[in-house]
Amino acid sequence: MRSTSDVVAELTQAAREVHMLTEGEKLRLVVRAYVAIQEGWKMLGQPDRLKESAETMDIIRAGGVPVHLYDDEMRAILQEAVTVIREIETAMEAKNNPAPAFGKTTEQGS
């Protein structure tokens, strides 16, 4: 499985070079974005967020569209996916590294 940063890098590069992508490559990227987002929300214990996210719904619609996606539409979808994946990544980091409670002090021995 690829790391989140690898997926973000791949989607970001594809958004910059969208004019060079074939329809098959576009579809593969949409699927990759969807799977990364789906897995992320599941890992966070929030699988319903997949259906609640407008950005994710754009990705789902793009994956089901049997017609050509224009470059600007594809670029926007890839950028939305990157935003959602980064949001998930931030939530995962916060979940794995909870901040210390405010107002608590630690005792140090002398």
Image (spheres, rainbow, N blue to C red):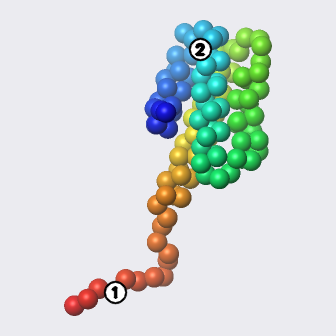
Residue at 77% across / 13% down in the picture?
A: 66
As drawn, the residue found furthest toward the bottom would be 110
Residue 8 makes an appearance in the image: yes
Crowding at dot 1, Cα within 10 Å, few <14 / some 14-19 / many 20+, comes out as few
Q: Disc 2 to disc 1, how far (Cα)? A: 57 Å
Q: In the depicted view, which residue is nearer to us: 103 or 28?
A: 28
User: Which image quadrant for residue 20?
Assistant: top right
Q: Is residue 19 above or below residue 32?
A: above
x and y, in percent, of residue 59 in the image: 70, 29
Q: Secondary structure at mark 2?
A: helix
- Crowd band around label 2 with a 10 angstrom C-alpha radius: few (<14), some (14–19), many (20+): few
Q: Which amino acid type corresponds to the residue marked 1 in the rendered image?
A: Glu
Q: Looking at the picture, how far across and down is residue 23, in whole percent?
A: 65, 10
Q: Nearer the viewer, residue 42 or 12?
A: 42
Q: Which residue is mark 2?
A: 25
Which residue is label 1 attached to?
Answer: 107
User: What residue is at 50 percent from the left and 75 percent from the top?
Assistant: 101
- Give SS at disc 1: loop
Task: Work out which residue is located at the far left of the displayed protein and give it.
Answer: 110
